[in-house]
Amino acid sequence: DGAMKGGPFIRAPVFVLVAFVLAGLSPALHAAVIVASSVSRNDVSNAVTTAVSGDTVIIPVGSATWTAGVIISNKTIRLAGMGTNQTFITDNIPKVTPEVSLIKYYASSNALIAEIAGLHISSGTVTQEQTLGRIRVIGDSKLLRVHHNVYTNAWGTIFSAEGFLHGVFDHNRTVTMD
């Protein structure tokens, strides 16, 4: 009978209030999905610039040839194409130094997953093999995942990781076409 006078009825609202306050502090609940206007390098770069940590940047269906790379820095986001049968990027970036990459990601958060997925990346007509990776991740993130990408006619290094990164490079494949 004493429990009816306030025991569980007082604790439940406090628990609910604490849950709502903690949920408000979670960056994942406030994450946005930003869809690039097209597969073009400029549209993808603009979407990445707009994103904040926790957001997902979607590269839509289509194909484009990139002549400059995209850099992700000072934020931890998910960069995702619509799938390897739908989002095609041709890497035609002049590799004048090893520093040049298609996607360079400075990943340093240990609270959010740094992720790149769902892309079909092909080599263009620029064939210098002087590169540290088409996808190059630098930092100390403990939550890195690069997955479900296809690399066609990939000369040189496909992926490189520098720093104290922990994560997985999984379900990626290379295809050689004549």
Image (tube, rainbow, N blue to C red):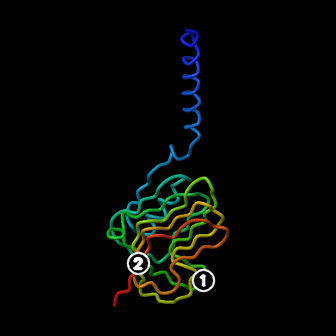
Q: Work out how far the residue at label 2 is from the one at label 1, CA to CA, in angstroms.
A: 18 Å
The residue depicted at 42 percent of the width and 80 percent of the height is 174
Residue 5 drawn at (x, y percent): 56, 9
Quarter containing the C terminus: bottom left
* Image quadrant assignment for residue 92: bottom left
Is 67 or 82 nearer to us in this picture?
A: 82
Look at the numbered disc 1 and give the secondary structure of its residue.
loop
Q: Judge by depth and name the residue closer to the eye, 121 or 164.
A: 164
Q: Which residue is mark 1?
A: 98
> Which disc is residue 5 wearing?
none
Residue assigned mark 2 = 90
Q: Position of residue 123 (x, y in %)?
A: 42, 83
Residue that appears at 40% across and 63% down: 59
First along the sequence among labels 2 and 1: 2
The quadrant in which residue 91 appears is bottom left
- Residue 85 image-quadrant placement: bottom left
Q: Residues within 10 Å of mark 2 (few under 14, many from 20)?
A: some
Q: How many marks?
A: 2
Looking at the rendered structure, the kind of residue marked 1 is Pro
Q: Nearer the viewer, residue 70 or 175?
A: 175
- Up/down of 64 relative to 130, above or below: above
Kindly state the secondary structure of the residue where label 2 is placed. Answer: strand
Residue 171 point in image, percent of width and height: 44, 70
- Against 22, residue 102 (above or below) is below
* Residue 84 percent coordinates (x, y): 36, 70
Count neighbours of disc 1 (C-alpha within 10 A) and say few if under 14, some if 14 to 19, many if 20 or more: few
